[in-house]
Amino acid sequence: MRTQLFIDNNDVAASNGNTFERRNSISNEVVTTAAAATVEDARRAVESAAAAFQSWSKTGPTERRSILLKAADILDAKTPQFIEVMAEEVGASALWAGFNVFLAAGLFREAAGMTTQIQGETIPTDKPNTLSMTVRQPVGVILSIVPWNGPVILAARAIAYPIACGNTVLFRASELSPKTHILIAEALREAGLPSGVLNVITNAPDDASTIVDALIEHPAVRRINFTGSTRVGRIIAEKAARQLKRCLLELGGKSPLVVLDDADIDAAVNAAVFGSFLYQGQICMSTERIVVDERVADEFVRKFAARAKELSAGDPRSNSACIVGPMINKSSGARLNGLLDDAIAKGAKVVAGGSANGSVMPATIVDCVKPDMQIYDEETFGPITTVVRAKDADDAVRIANDTAYGLSSGVFGRDVTRALGIAMRMQAGSVHVNGSTVQNEAQAPYGGTKASGYGRFDGRAVIDEFTELKWITIEPADQPYPF
């Protein structure tokens, strides 16, 4: 597969002709050769978006809605192509790839409906014969940066919402999923999105910092949204702050699932299996900490381990039924083996799975995890989860909150009033009572607290992220002034 830069609705080579390669994490075969943008290419893409903003910002909601709805249908139709490309580039199963496209198409439709919900309000005023009101206006060029792990849904929200609000987008695709991300741009072009409203650049990994710096510094870029690691999010926030530019950051997580003593254990196990091992645990809201009341811990762990051992594993390119595929690269396996060895040396027990072999690792559960183990609070981002045993409900809340992160979480208990009380005490952007930590709906606000970032994607909350609120008054010209 080969990809070019996507500027002014055209596929163009990098200005110096350079390319970079994306290799499959199991075979090491080259699967995508992508254009490696220069700083000049990045600036050209921003300037194209800035020029397109002059007309796109003036379009009515019906035009924006029509294009977004057409793009949703085109994305749906491209599902088989996304499944094929994501298996090659990011080791995704057909389930995860198809789920990505399904969610992305739904998000485009939600964004289409949002075009008529961008509203201001009238404000009471003490000035006679005066109208005081607010309006929301698009802000300009939005810089959107997303990772490879949920490449379709994460790109969709970083593109569709700004466009629905009348902005234009410079999308910096992940160097690990360039073809997947270009497919989304192609869908929007097919839907009739005008030239320059969306521009996409890809860059070689070694050039990422230089190019992102140039984009953040460009005066036409007015806001930045970034999904990725907390480490990189901090860097972007600091650079944006120097330019006085607002960010929306959705960063790392160590999502806890609390299992109370009155929980439906089989239901909790179902949620834990899904949340821990969907897409090899390489999802920001994957269930990485299962906090179980010690009175039901033995039963939960026994059933959870049995289910994990049944999960099919392999290469999604040759095994369409596999659930646990390869991790994004071999270095992930080495990193997880280090965390596993440290936990075992300090008394943890492996009750399912085991060490990684390169990028391949079975569904792994580590029981009896304690705070002195690195895996207790370090994000794993792989097919491995931990069980921490709690003395009671209060201790479970303490453990669940004993992390730098605060993205997603869940709590299981038959007494829903009690479980709701626990949910209110958990420090996370979302809490699901009797549900998995891995959940997303385009109409519900999603984002984190603490080291998991700030701001919200999805729902009406996203309108504030991608519009400016302006106060306007209409006053009698002959009004008196005190001097």
Image: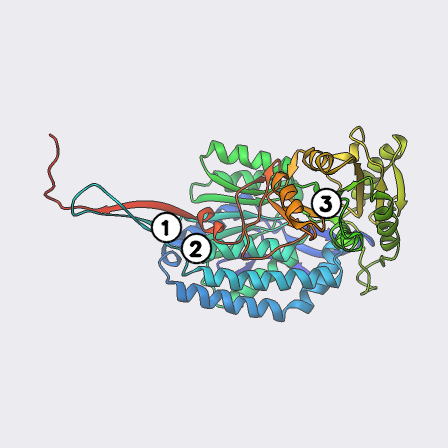
Dots 1 and 2: beta carbons under 8 Å? yes
Q: Does label 3 or label 1 sit earlier along the sequence? A: 1
- The residue indicated by pointer 1 is 136
Q: Amino acid at mark 3?
A: Leu
Residue depth check, mark 3 versus mark 1: number of the one nearer the observer: 3
Q: Between tags 1 and 2, which lies in front? A: 1
**Which label sits in the foreground, 2 or 3?**
3
User: Quadrant of residue 54 in the image?
Assistant: bottom left
User: Looking at the rendered structure, which numbered label has been put on residue 254?
Assistant: none
Relative to 97, does residue 377 appear above or below in the rendering?
above
Residues tagged 3 and 1 counted as in contact (Cβ below 8 A): no
User: Percent x, y for residue 274?
Assistant: 75, 55
Q: Which mark is residue 165?
A: 2
Q: Quadrant of the N terminus?
A: bottom right
Relative to 12, residue 258 above or below: above
Q: Position of residue 26 (x, y in %)?
A: 82, 53
Mark 2 or mark 3: whose residue is earlier in sequence: 2
Q: Are marks 2 and 3 in contact (CB under 8 Å)?
A: no
Q: Residue at x 46, y 38 (%)?
A: 245
- Mark 2 vs mark 3, CA separation in Å: 35 Å
Tell me how far mark 1 sits from mark 2, CA to CA.
9 Å
* Mark sitting on residue 257: 3
Q: Nearer the viewer, residue 292 or 101?
A: 292
Residue 130 appears at what percent x and percent y?
A: 19, 47
What residue type is disc 1 on? Arg
Label 3, label 1: how many angstroms apart (C-alpha)? 39 Å
Q: How many marks?
A: 3
Q: Along the line of sight, which residue is nearer the eye, 56 or 258?
A: 258
- 86 or 368, nearer to the observer: 368
Between 322 and 439, the one nearer to me in the picture:
439
Secondary element type, mark 2 = loop
